[in-house]
DNA sequence: TAGTGGTCTAGACCACCGC
DNA sequence: CGGTGGTCTAGACCACTAG
């Protein structure tokens, strides 16, 4: 019983991605990585029963608490399910994305093997509307940067983003080569940290400007995502209205009795 | 320092809802409930710093691990955020819903103070399509129950649900008074347990049938939620295609680097 | 009934934040 | 620098599942 896929990696390991693994990573993250890798590799199919806590604890020379922490991360990600008394089982379905892939169109595009691109339609510094002040939590009358950009997936226009950036960040955005780079990644290079995001998703008909920019007919259904992103201390950084061509994109959410991260709201009026 | 909102409830307490609280509940759930209640009551505004683990441990006479478990539940729910070295802070925004409110239209409607209703358009037992067999994970040629129902919020039609139920469950559904009851709640009374759900959300144009049932014009944008729900052992119970009137409903998702439960997918084609 | 996960404790060391 | 959260241990008892 040595060459199992769940045996801890020894040397020269370079964890691919996921739980922030790396060289100086924590034990429970590595356990979670190993289990996830084993699932992705097909060693554990959907519905398969995973090893018990006790077995993994022995295999890694770790305490039970550490193994439980690893499993908890996988449950939170919707990868496995857990019930008292029974072995944990693998949940099928699409692989989930990292937080960063959700906030950055470019990162998401590359993660699914598509080539992201962007074309700036409008960039301006202007007084924020009342609505924008509320969402960005800045005083009335503040000036914010507005960016309107068309995003492409392998050459096809699939999304319009209309984003308002709060002041310290807006100035950084204004100085970028917006047609090429990922703003999110560029801002992170500059020390801006995106920590929490709140997404609101609904369906709207394409306006005439939407239709022109996306090269579709007006009134076709668009999937709208309005997003607020905050830094680690809770300061709002951006407020964005993104509209996807209806047949281009869908959102998926996995939830269970223990992990509830999605909410359904009635729209105003 | 006694009558604080975070002091553990003594006797005769009847926790309202949320973390599965009740009389014979666990300590960490009660701590989480108390904190959440304090946030909802306004004692801790968005951005406020919460008490430290050590302080709460002392106040509840609990160990640090238990308090951490309570905080972890709140982080998973997107209610608070957490970073090493700094006090936890309250995140603003809409209150999230329980898993049950997400799966059951009726429960959701009542939670937001609206009166749910339903009108059966069609109910039939027929052979499942190839697509349905795949989603319900039943053999090709299986028979499944199909239900088409229009759902109302305080008298206004806002959603069409087209649901396929896997066999053991379908028979139960067929025997219900579908115009009145919540199917989900009724099934739970009969011992069926909904444990995990996977939601896929996109935008589509209303078909002529959609338009007729929802009393709107054809081609208006609808928010479509396709949902698969499984029982605790991973057996698929239902596969549903729900379509909401565009300006009636939106979904919101809160995510952060530690809790990633949402995924964005390109649709086929 | 044996195995397994859920809850809880008491203590330890470290990394990070803010003063 | 002290306070704080992040990680980890070793052990205990209980509730539930499955054979």
Image (cartoon, coloured by chain):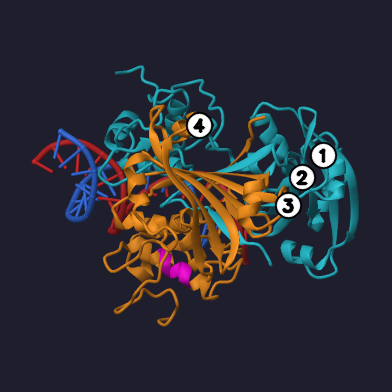
Chain colours: A orange, B cyan, C blue, D red
Alpha carbon separation for disc pair 2 and 4: 26 Å
Mark 2 lies on residue: B220
Q: Position of residue B214 (x, y in %)?
A: 82, 40
Give the number of the mark in front: 4 or 1: 4
Which label sits on residue B204?
3
Q: Are marks 2 and 4 on the same chain?
A: no
Q: Position of residue B128 (x, y in %)?
A: 84, 63
Mark 4 lies on residue: A131
In this rendering, is residue A166 above or below B48?
below
Alpha carbon separation for disc pair 3 and 1: 14 Å
Magenta residues, as a range? A32-37
Label 1: few (<14), some (14–19) or many (≥20) C-alpha neighbours in 10 Å: some
Give the number of the mark in front: 3 or 4: 4
Q: Which chain letter matches label 4?
A: A
Q: Which residue is nearer to you in this view: B212 or A210?
A: A210
| SS label for mark 2 | loop
Q: Position of residue B263 (x, y in %)?
A: 55, 56
Quadrant of the rendered structure where residue A153 is?
bottom right
């Amino acid at each position: 019983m040595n060459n199992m896929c769940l045996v801890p990696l020894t040397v020269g390991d370079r964890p691919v991605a996921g739980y922030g693994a790396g060289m100086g990573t924590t034990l429970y993250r590595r356990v979670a990585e190993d289990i996830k890798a084993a699932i992705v590799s097909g060693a554990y199919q959907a519905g398969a029963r995973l090893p018990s806590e006790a077995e993994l604890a022995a295999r890694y020379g770790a305490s039970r608490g550490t193994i439980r922490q690893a499993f908890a991360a996988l449950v939170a990600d919707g990868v496995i399910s857990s019930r008292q008394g029974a072995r944990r089982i693998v949940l099928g379905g699409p692989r989930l994305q990292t937080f960063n892939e959700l906030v950055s169109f470019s990162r998401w595009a590359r993660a699914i093997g598509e080539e992201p691109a962007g074309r700036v339609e409008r960039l301006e510094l202007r007084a924020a509307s009342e609505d924008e002040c509320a969402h960005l939590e800045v005083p009335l009358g503040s000036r914010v940067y507005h960016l309107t950009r068309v995003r492409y997936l392998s050459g096809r226009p699939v999304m319009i983003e209309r984003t308002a950036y709060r002041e310290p960040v807006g100035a950084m955005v204004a100085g970028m080569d917006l047609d090429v780079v990922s703003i999110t990644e560029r801002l992170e290079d500059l020390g801006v940290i995106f920590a929490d995001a709140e997404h609101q998703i609904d369906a709207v008909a394409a306006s005439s400007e939407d239709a022109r920019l996306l090269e579709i007919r007006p009134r076709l259904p668009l999937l709208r995502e309005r997003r607020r992103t905050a830094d680690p201390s809770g300061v709002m950084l951006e407020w964005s209205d993104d509209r996807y061509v209806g047949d281009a994109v869908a959102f998926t959410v996995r939830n269970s009795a223990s992990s509830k991260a999605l909410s359904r709201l009635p729209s105003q009026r």
